Image (cartoon, rainbow, N blue to C red):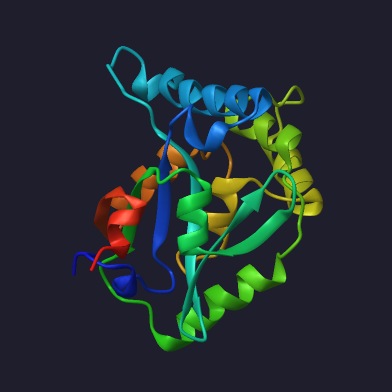
Amino acid sequence: MLIKHWTDIKTGDRLFKDTDFNDKGKNFFMKIVTWVISHAQNLRKENRGKKLGDGADHTETFIRINGELFVFSATKDKGVRPMPFHRWVVQEGNPKIEIIRRRIPYSTIEKKMITNMAFQDLGLPYALKAGSKALLGKDKKGNIDEVEADIESRGMICSETTARWDIDKYDWPEMLPKRLKELYLQNDASVAFFGRGLTLYKI
């Protein structure tokens, strides 16, 4: 079922935010982070020579709590945190978003597992340095397992949180947001919504 209103969104649906350097008046540092993530995705071997537009620069996981819709993700300043979806959309400047949904719905038990995994990680810091090494393949020791262990012990970055809070596990190393979206679409998921976030709140 396609998502036409925010009330159609379910626990376990994944949100991918399109890159927009002007979103919410980002400070200079975050514009650089956005630029690096977007262009790193387009420089990967499988994307070279293709004319690719901006990719997703952030991912979130939808979770419903007592009827209210939240997005859970890793943030630079507060670590892993939940935020009401409507507030998130306004704060992000009403960006274009893509919502990916698994074709086989999550069971009640699976939804509880996703929720529990997300709550266990609340407050974990945004592991920018270790995450950048993994995303950009810059592990000097040539051992990606050490980078992954560093992220596990010190915190996470956005695409890892989305992959981690899932029943179907996906590999973390080198997982940029665009790559994660591709993996979902290749593994029994489909696009349930694409457009400006606030259009989901129109009656």
Q: Nearer the viewer, residue 194 or 89?
A: 89
Q: Quadrant of residue 12?
A: bottom left
Q: Nearer the viewer, residue 45 or 129?
A: 129
Residue 162 position, x and y percent, is 52, 56
Q: Nearer the viewer, residue 200 or 129?
A: 200
Tally of numbered discs: 0
Residue 165 position, x and y percent, is 55, 64
Query: Vertical placement of 108 versus 93: above or below?
Result: below
Residue 121 position, x and y percent, is 70, 65
Q: Answer yes or no: is residue 171 visible.
A: no
Which residue is pictured at 41% across the width and 59% down the height?
14
Which residue is pictured at 29% across the width and 73% down the height?
8
Residue 20 position, x and y percent, is 43, 31
Question: Which quadrant of the figure contains the C terminus?
Answer: bottom left
Query: Vertical placement of 170 versus 102: above or below?
Result: above
Query: Vertical placement of 59 versus 167: above or below?
Result: above
Query: From this viewpoint, which residue is outermost toward the front?
Result: 203
Q: Quadrant of residue 139?
A: top right
Q: Nearer the viewer, residue 160 or 20?
A: 20
Which residue is pictured at 53% across the width and 83% down the height?
112
Please give left or right for residue 87 compared with residue 140 in the image: left
Q: Quadrant of residue 76?
A: top right
Query: Vertical placement of 100 versus 117: above or below?
Result: above
Question: Which quadrant of the figure contains the N terminus?
Answer: bottom left
Query: From this viewpoint, which residue is outermost toward the left?
Result: 1
Q: Answer yes or no: is residue 26 visible.
A: yes
Which residue is pictured at 68% across the width and 29% down the height?
133
